Image (cartoon, rainbow, N blue to C red):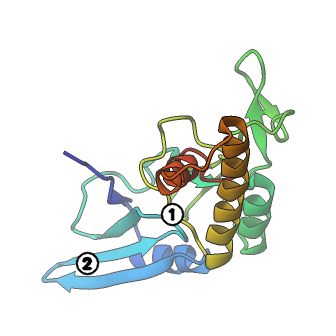
């Protein structure tokens, strides 16, 4: 059975202040609903399938107690600059060195899963940006493309790789759609 993470609940003190903070980051407002004495606001980060909820009467957790929720980005420096440009107090970029200790700057080889930055919302709920340029094998369940141009690039990359495959085998591959699908699922950022 599939179980997909849908929502992270953020405990906050001032719903409107928090809503303004996240909307200023470009997060989409999905809902702002009042149920008797409760209020639920749902916002979604750009490109994310998972949203956040905050409001009144939805959690008894202490405001600011959510720590280290990851936001995945494909360019840590650009993401940090965008946040800073929106007035967010975001940390400098950092990485783990060979001993596992945190060190300043992007990871020397710019390895996927290796560079970070952090920021907090007005209540102190913390977020960790993590740069992921290539997913580990088996980590990708579905492949999505953000634009027709991105899909076109992926199809061209698959066509080039498939051409090499046919050169190696020396024959036309009638199962090329299956080959393309497998290639594109295994190389979503090619």
Mark 1: secondary structure = loop
Of 2 and 26, the residue lying toward us: 2
Q: Quadrant of residue 12?
A: bottom left
Q: Position of residue 165 (x, y in %)?
A: 67, 42
In the figure, residue 50 lies in which quadrant?
bottom left
Which of the two marks, 2 or 1, is nearer to us in this view? 1
Mark closest to the chain's N terminus, 2 or 1: 2
Residue 114 visible in the current orientation: no
> What mark, if any, has residue 144 been given in the picture?
1
Side of 87 where 141 appears, left or right: left
The residue carrying mark 2 is 39
- Mark 2–mark 1 distance (CA, rounded to whole Å): 33 Å
Residue toward you, 37 or 68: 68
**Quick one: label 2, few (<14), some, or many (20+) residues within 10 Å?**
some
Residue at 54 percent of width and 34 percent of height? 137
Residue closest to the far top = 99
- Tell me where residue 174 appears, x and y as whole percent: 50, 53
Secondary structure state at the residue bearing disc 2: strand
Q: Quadrant of residue 40?
A: bottom left
Residue 183: x and y in percent read 57, 47
- The structure residue drawn at horizontal position 48% and vertical position 64%, both measured from the top left corner, is 48
In the visual, does 77 lie left or right of 144? right
Instruction: Assign the N terminus to one quadrant of the image.
Output: top left
Who is closer to the viewer here, 148 or 121?
A: 148
Please state the horizontal and vertical placement of residue 186, each as a whole percent of the image: 55, 44
Give the answer, above or below, for where 19 lies relative to 80: below
């Amino acid at each position: 059975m599939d179980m997909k993470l849908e929502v992270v609940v953020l405990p906050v003190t001032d719903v409107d202040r928090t809503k303004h903070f996240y909307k200023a980051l470009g997060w989409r407002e999905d809902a702002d609903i009042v149920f008797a004495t409760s209020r639920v606001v749902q916002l979604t980060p750009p490109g994310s399938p998972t949203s956040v909820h905050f409001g009144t009467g939805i959690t008894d957790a202490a405001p600011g107690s959510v720590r280290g929720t990851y936001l995945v980005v494909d360019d840590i420096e650009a993401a940090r600059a965008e946040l800073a440009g929106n007035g967010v107090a975001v940390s400098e970029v950092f990485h783990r060195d060979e001993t596992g200790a945190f060190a300043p700057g992007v990871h020397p080889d710019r390895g996927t899963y290796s560079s970070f930055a952090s920021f907090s919302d007005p209540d102190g709920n913390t977020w960790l940006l993590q740069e992921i340029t290539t997913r580990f094998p088996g980590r990708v369940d579905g492949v999505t493309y953000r634009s027709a141009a991105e899909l076109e690039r992926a199809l061209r990359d698959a066509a080039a790789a498939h051409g090499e495959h046919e050169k190696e085998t020396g024959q036309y591959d009638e199962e090329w759609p299956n080959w393309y699908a497998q290639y594109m699922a295994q190389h979503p950022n090619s």
